[in-house]
């Protein structure tokens, strides 16, 4: 689960990280009062969307020359004028895709006098099985570009979970960031604060880009992107409160309500599969035959008829879907339950695209019989390969 920058900063502030004063607003009416709460004379108006690259982004309705999604303002009036241009408008960044995202919230923040922009993040390093810091002097740029062009400018440092951030760890990171006093002296504490926040809140990513050294030599967290491990959310009700559903894919929200593992993708073949491994294999084989999956969907082991119906509805609600492939290996899941779920769903929402069904395993004969007798226009397939070929052919014509 992702949250907004202003929320991430509030969480980090609780742990003692240095963040600027700021006020979140949802309407232009609030802009003046928000700015007046800050010291000035420099303000920053920041679009709050679940995507990065806002500074370099562009608003759809405004011309190419207009300023981006993060703007400096030199007076309260300037804050209000910028808020008017930004709120309710669609911001397109490298991470939003061409459709962009509507800016419904703005964060009005105290402006900082920046001397240096650095990169610092924490993530779960799968190769070492530890939480690792990633540090680079190249802040403000996207780290993927740095990794590609100047990989030697990135330090990845896994942390021993038993000892936490040691003095030696802090010193290594501070050196990689080329810090000098007083920032150098503040850094150890900041690293421990971030590590504690990451661990205690079950984050999966904490990215500060940029972490800045201000002209007065002190450190400040200037941007913050935080993602939480969805499997641990049950023990963080106050984090769940921060969820902004308007930022999420409607189909993914619907799927999560039915406890379905669903990820929306951009292709045109909708997939309904049981088991994550089989779902991945199904997506691969669709690609192998020259098409793209519209989603990842694992209905799970013991899915009920209702769950299958919900899954089918989510797939057919996607306007990109030009064909559906159901690929079920009935182990715990019974093929007849799948068949009944599909028929119930088709009766409710109709079927306007080709549907290929491949059933195998428990109660397969009964499942096939139910589908045959339903009179549904289904293309039957014998195995995974056959199924993928048939659906790609049906979609591509
Ligand atoms: P994004 O990464 O989405 O573009 P950032 O929060 O990193 O958004 O902001 C982009 C840039 O705007 C920063 O790299 C920094 O140069 C500037 N900036 C952001 N917040 C402030 C602030 N409070 N004071 C001064 N400059 C800022
Ligand atoms: Mg940033």
Image (cartoon, grey):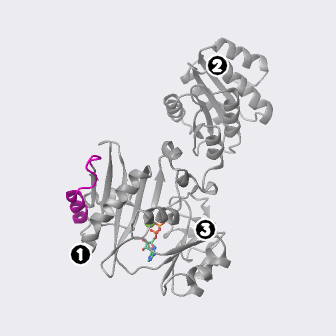
Query: What is the secondary structure assignment of the residue under circle 1?
Result: loop
Residue 141 can be seen in this image: no
- Which is more foreground, mark 1 or mark 2? 1
In-image side of 218 versus 32 (left or right): left
**Mark number displayed over residue 335:** 2
Tell me how far mark 3 sits from mark 1, CA to CA: 37 Å
Q: Which residues are magenta?
A: 160-176
Crowd class of label 1 (few under 14; some 14 to 19; many from 20; radius 10 Å): few
Crowd class of label 2 (few under 14; some 14 to 19; many from 20; radius 10 Å): many
Q: Earlier in the sequence, mark 3 or mark 1?
A: 3
The answer to whether residue 67 is above or below residue 210 is below
Residue furthest to the top in view is 365
Question: What's the residue at 64%, 13% (across, down)?
Answer: 363
Question: What's the residue at 71%, 27% (across, down)?
Answer: 342
Task: Compare residues 39 and 142 and report the one nearer the observer.
Answer: 39
Dot 3 corresponds to which residue? Answer: 105
**Does the stretch in magenta take in 169?**
yes
Looking at the picture, how far across and down is residue 169, in whole percent? 23, 57
Dot 1 corresponds to which residue? Answer: 181
The answer to whether residue 57 is above or below residue 162 is below
**Does the stretch in magenta take in 361?**
no
Crowd class of label 3 (few under 14; some 14 to 19; many from 20; radius 10 Å): many
Looking at the picture, how far across and down is residue 278, in whole percent? 51, 28
Question: What's the residue at 27%, 46% (across, down)?
Answer: 162
Task: Compare residues 382 and 135 and report the one nearer the observer.
Answer: 135
Q: Give the number of callouts.
A: 3
- Which is more foreground, mark 3 or mark 1? 1
């Amino acid at each position: 689960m992702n949250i907004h920058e202003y929320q991430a900063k509030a969480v980090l502030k609780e742990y003692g990280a240095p963040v600027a004063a700021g006020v979140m607003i949802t309407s232009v009416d609030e802009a003046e009062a928000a700015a007046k709460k800050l010291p000035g004379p420099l303000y920053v108006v920041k679009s709050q969307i679940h995507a990065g690259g806002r500074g370099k982004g562009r608003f759809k309705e405004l011309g190419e020359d207009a300023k981006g999604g993060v703007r400096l303002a030199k007076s309260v009036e300037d804050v209000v004028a910028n808020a008017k241009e930004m709120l309710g408008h669609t911001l397109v960044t490298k991470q939003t895709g061409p459709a962009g995202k509507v800016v419904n919230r703005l964060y009005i923040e105290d402006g900082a006098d920046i001397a240096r922009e650095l990169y610092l993040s924490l993530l779960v390093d799968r190769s070492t099985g530890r939480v690792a810091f990633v540090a680079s002097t190249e802040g403000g740029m996207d780290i993927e570009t740095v990794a590609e062009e100047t990989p030697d400018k990135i330090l990845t440092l896994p942390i021993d979970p038993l000892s936490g951030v040691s003095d030696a760890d802090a010193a290594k990171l501070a050196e990689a960031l080329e810090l000098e006093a007083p920032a150098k002296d503040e850094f150890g504490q900041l690293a421990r604060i971030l590590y504690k926040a990451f661990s205690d809140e079950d984050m999966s990513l904490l990215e500060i880009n940029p972490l800045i050294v201000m002209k007065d030599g002190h450190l400040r967290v200037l941007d913050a992107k935080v993602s939480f491990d969805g499997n641990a959310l049950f023990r963080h009700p106050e984090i769940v409160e921060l969820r902004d559903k308007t930022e999420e894919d409607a189909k993914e929200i619907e799927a999560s309500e039915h406890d379905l593992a669903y990820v929306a993708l951009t292709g045109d073949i909708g997939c309904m599969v049981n088991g994550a491994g089989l779902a991945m294999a199904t997506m691969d084989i669709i690609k192998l035959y020259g098409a793209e999956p519209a989603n990842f969907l694992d209905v799970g082991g013991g899915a009920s008829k209702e769950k299958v119906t919900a899954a089918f509805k989510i797939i057919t609600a996607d306007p990109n879907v030009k064909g559906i492939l159901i690929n079920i290996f009935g182990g715990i899941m019974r093929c007849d339950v799948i068949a009944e779920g599909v028929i119930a769903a088709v009766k409710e929402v109709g079927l306007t695209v080709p549907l290929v069904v491949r059933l195998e395993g428990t109660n397969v004969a009964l499942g096939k019989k139910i589908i045959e007798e339903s009179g549904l226009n289904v293309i039957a397939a014998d195995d995974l390969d056959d199924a993928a070929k048939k659906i790609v052919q049906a979609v591509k014509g």
